[in-house]
């Protein structure tokens, strides 16, 4: 059991880092799963595991931004309360595309695109997009604060989030790209991505658990322990990753992440090719 817990710690570290950096947590978890496998873990359990550990990452966002997201916090002025409710309204508007488009396609996309070649290809494609976007970014951003973001822009960012249904895209990467293309600053796009993750990832995790448990997928006591450990580690690592990214984007662009995605994608394609030949 000790070895299984160490594996869970590794998964939690990978999730906590890659969920928030625009490098695709799904792609990295698939990669880890290639070499680090849990004892007696069924494909159904791993499907649930890879989604449920996101709850730890979501909790980190809620802890870091609790005051900002809480409209009932004592000491807030009427204007601050109004802006908080407006922020939540924008998050809800941005979630609409995921509900209308994402939910019906979720299972189909998982069945057809959850594999190494697709993940590798998406890593490369969006890595190129990040580099192109940063090199072509000549105009100053129009939206420099969340208060200035319109509901139309929030909805458009939500449309970009739907692209993340294809494994390897990166939910944070898609929404950050969408936000910047819609005229937001890097900081605004990044921060809104964190907030948008709360209902989207929580809903996806809950839906996946209910669906699998409804199909009679059993979870042993040891597996619950593994899940809990991975979630706790993902929470702790996410606290660091979120603070790192918010500080990083204030002084740097996303080019380094684009280059990383391309290198990782190429390596994965090579590995997938060797695996197919063997």
Image (cartoon, rainbow, N blue to C red):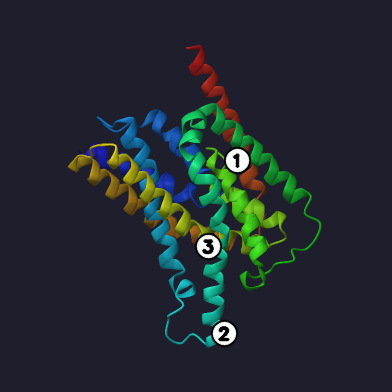
Look at the image and tell me in which quarter the N terminus lies.
Answer: top left
Asked if 106 appears above or below 188 in the picture, the reply is: above
Q: Which residue is found at the position 25% from the left and 37% from the top?
A: 216
| Label 1: few (<14), some (14–19) or many (≥20) C-alpha neighbours in 10 Å | some
Note whether residue 75 is visible.
yes
Q: Which residue is found at the position 57% from the left and 52% from the top?
A: 97
Circle nearer the viewer, 3 or 1? 3
Side of 3 relative to 52 (left or right) = left
> Under tag 1, what secondary structure?
helix
Expressed as whole percent of the image width and height from the top left, the position of residue 87 reads 55, 70
Whole-angstrom CA distance, mark 1 to mark 2, is 42 Å
Side of 210 relative to 155 (left or right) = left
Count of residue discs: 3
Residue tagged by mark 3? 92
- Which sits earlier in the primary sequence, circle 3 or circle 1? 3
- Quadrant in which residue 246 is drawn: bottom right
> Under tag 3, what secondary structure?
helix
Residue tagged by mark 2? 79
- Which sits earlier in the primary sequence, circle 1 or circle 2? 2
Expressed as whole percent of the image width and height from the top left, the position of residue 252 reads 66, 57
Please state which of residues 166 and 105 is positioned toward the viewer in this rendering: 105
Q: Tell me the number on the disc at residue 131.
A: none
């Amino acid at each position: 059991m000790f070895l299984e817990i160490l594996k869970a710690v590794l998964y939690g570290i990978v999730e906590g880092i890659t969920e928030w950096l625009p490098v695709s947590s799904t792609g990295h978890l698939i990669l880890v799963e290639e070499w680090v496998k849990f004892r007696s873990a069924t494909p159904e359990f791993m499907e649930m595991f890879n989604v449920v550990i996101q709850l730890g990452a979501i909790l980190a966002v809620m802890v870091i931004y609790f005051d900002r997201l809480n409209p009932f916090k004592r000491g807030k002025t009427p204007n601050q309360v109004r802006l908080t409710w407006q922020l939540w309204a924008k998050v809800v508007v941005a979630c609409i595309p995921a509900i209308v488009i994402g939910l019906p396609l979720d299972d189909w996309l998982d069945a057809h695109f959850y594999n190494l070649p697709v993940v590798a290809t998406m890593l490369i494609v969006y890595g190129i997009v990040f580099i192109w976007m940063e090199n072509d970014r000549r105009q100053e951003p129009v939206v420099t604060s969340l208060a200035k973001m319109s509901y139309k822009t929030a909805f458009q960012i939500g449309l970009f989030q739907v692209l993340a249904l294809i494994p390897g895209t990166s939910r944070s990467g898609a929404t950050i790209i969408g936000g910047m293309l819609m005229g937001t600053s890097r900081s605004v796009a990044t921060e809104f991505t964190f907030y948008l993750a709360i209902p989207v990832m929580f809903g996806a995790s809950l839906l996946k658990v209910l669906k699998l448990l409804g199909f009679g997928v059993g979870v042993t006591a040891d597996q619950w322990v593994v899940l809990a450990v991975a979630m706790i580690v993902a929470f702790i690592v996410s606290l660091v990753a979120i603070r790192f990214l918010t500080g990083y984007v204030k002084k740097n662009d996303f080019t380094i992440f684009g280059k990383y995605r391309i290198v990782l994608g190429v390596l994965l394609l090579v590995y997938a090719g060797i695996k197919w030949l063997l």
